[in-house]
Image (cartoon, grey):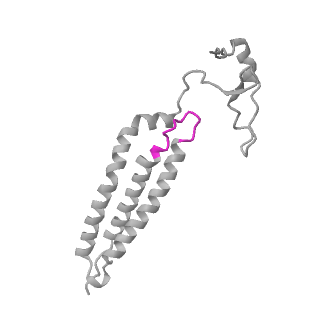
């Protein structure tokens, strides 16, 4: 069996970190090559230099994720229930000739919910995955928190706006 190569000595490690070349991307100067020379002519990935400080957003995401995930999972159900209640209120208050048809209301709720859920998903992924210290599961924030919350908010606002329609004044 052949022996595995030994890690770089501490005196060599400093030289390897100084030779990091900037990446050639649109964000020139902001990104750096995360590989270092290993002393054998190959380039290997740098290991972490210890625990990294999390910024405030990452701390909030980490500590509130279970609570916000629970809210994200039940909020669409609560919003759908409120949408039914708002439509019943609208149906009872407004005369039949001015009433919004149930099919049109259902389509509006579905379309607005899907569109806002999609944008919430994108916003949540960008929010949670914006730093180099983000984990590989950072995209779950968009799927379980911001996507469902924004979808529920859109459904609730559609129902609430429909319930604000006043009955016609009687002459």
Q: Residue 149: horizontal and vertical position, in percent?
A: 40, 52
Closest to the observer, 71 or 11? 11
| Total tally of numbered discs in the picture | 0
In which quadrant will I find the C terminus?
A: bottom left
User: Residue at position x 47%, y 33% from top?
Assistant: 59
Question: For residue 8, which quarter of the picture?
Answer: top right
Closest to the observer, 7 or 92? 7
Closest to the observer, 32 or 80? 32
Q: Residue 72: horizontal and vertical position, in percent?
A: 37, 48
Please indicate whether residue 10 sits to the left or right of residue 77 in the image: right
Q: Residue 77: horizontal and vertical position, in percent?
A: 30, 56
Among all residues in the image, which is located at the extreme bottom? 171
Question: For residue 22, which quarter of the picture?
Answer: top right
Please check the rendered image and state whether residue 90 is part of the magenta-colored stretch, yes or no. no
Among all residues in the image, which is located at the extreme front? 1
User: Residue at position x 66%, y 14% from top?
Assistant: 6
Q: Which residues are magenta?
A: 129-141
Q: Residue 71: horizontal and vertical position, in percent?
A: 34, 47
User: Residue at position x 31%, y 69% from top?
Assistant: 163
Please check the rendered image and state whether residue 134 is part of the magenta-colored stretch, yes or no. yes
Question: For residue 33, which quarter of the picture?
Answer: top right
- The correct choice, above or below, for 11 with respect to 126 in the image is above
User: Residue at position x 50%, y 34% from top?
Assistant: 56
| Prevalent SS, magenta region | loop
């Amino acid at each position: 069996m052949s022996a595995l190569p030994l890690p770089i000595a501490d005196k060599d490690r400093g030289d390897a970190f100084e030779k990091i070349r900037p990446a050639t991307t649109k964000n020139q100067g902001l990104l750096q090559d995360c590989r270092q020379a290993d002393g054998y002519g190959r380039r290997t990935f740098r290991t972490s230099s210890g625990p990294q400080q999390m910024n405030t957003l990452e701390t909030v995401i980490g500590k509130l994720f279970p609570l916000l995930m629970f809210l994200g999972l039940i909020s669409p159900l609560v919003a759908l229930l409120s949408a039914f209640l708002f439509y019943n209120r609208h149906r009872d208050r407004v005369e039949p000739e001015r009433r919004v048809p149930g099919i049109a209301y259902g389509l509006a709720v579905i379309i607005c919910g899907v569109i806002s859920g999609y944008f919430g998903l994108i916003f949540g992924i960008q929010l949670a995955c914006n730093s180099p210290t983000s984990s590989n599961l950072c995209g779950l924030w968009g799927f379980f928190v911001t996507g469902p919350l924004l979808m529920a908010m859109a459904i609730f606002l559609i129902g609430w706006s429909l319930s604000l329609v006043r009955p016609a004044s009687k002459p």
